[in-house]
């Protein structure tokens, strides 16, 4: 009884920390995806933003707003 009374606050604090980290990660990924959804979508990787679709920020061509190397299975498709 005494052990559970001592460990319960620590377990709840740990659970709260894990849930906070998970919700923060979800918010960050959703913001990246929705911000890039204005310009197009990633064909082959659903719910991926442009950086993840192209394989990293160094593979994004800012002039054409697409990927530097377009693969056959995964590519960035513009709406227009």
Image (cartoon, grey):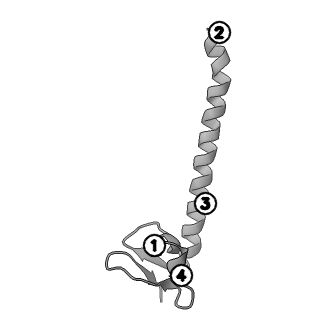
- Dot 4 or dot 3, earlier in sequence: 3
Name which residue lies at 37% across and 75% down: 74
**In this rendering, position of residue 36 left or right of residue 16:** left
Give the percent coordinates (x, y) of residue 68: 46, 84
Q: Residues within 10 Å of mark 1 (few under 14, many from 20)?
A: many
The residue that label 2 is drawn on is 2
10 Å crowding of disc 2: few (<14), some (14-19), many (20+): few
Q: Residue 20 at what x, y percent from top left?
A: 64, 45
Disc 3 residue crowd, few under 14, some 14–19, many 20+, Cα 10 Å = few
The residue lying at 45 percent from left, 73 percent from top is 53
Of the numbered discs 2 and 3, the one sitting upstream in the chain is: 2
Residue carrying label 3 = 28
Who is closer to the viewer here, 40 or 61? 61
Image height of 15 relative to 74, above or below: above
Q: CA distance from mark 2 to mark 3?
A: 40 Å
First along the sequence among labels 1 and 2: 2
Distance between the alpha carbons at the discs numbered 4 and 3: 18 Å
| Residue 16 to residue 8: above or below | below
Which element type, helix, strand or loop, lies under badge 1?
helix
Residue 43 image-quadrant placement: bottom left
- Name the N-terminal-most of marks 3 and 1: 3
Residue assigned mark 1:
53
Quadrant where the N terminus lies?
top right
Q: Earlier in the sequence, mark 4 or mark 2?
A: 2
């Amino acid at each position: 009884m005494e052990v559970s009374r001592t460990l319960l606050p620590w377990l709840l604090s740990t659970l709260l920390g894990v849930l906070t980290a998970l919700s923060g990660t979800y918010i960050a990924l959703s913001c990246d995806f929705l911000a890039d959804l204005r310009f197009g979508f990633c064909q082959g990787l659903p719910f991926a933003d442009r950086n993840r679709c192209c394989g990293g920020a160094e593979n994004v061509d800012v002039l054409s707003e697409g990927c530097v190397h377009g693969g056959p299975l995964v590519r960035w498709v513009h709406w227009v």
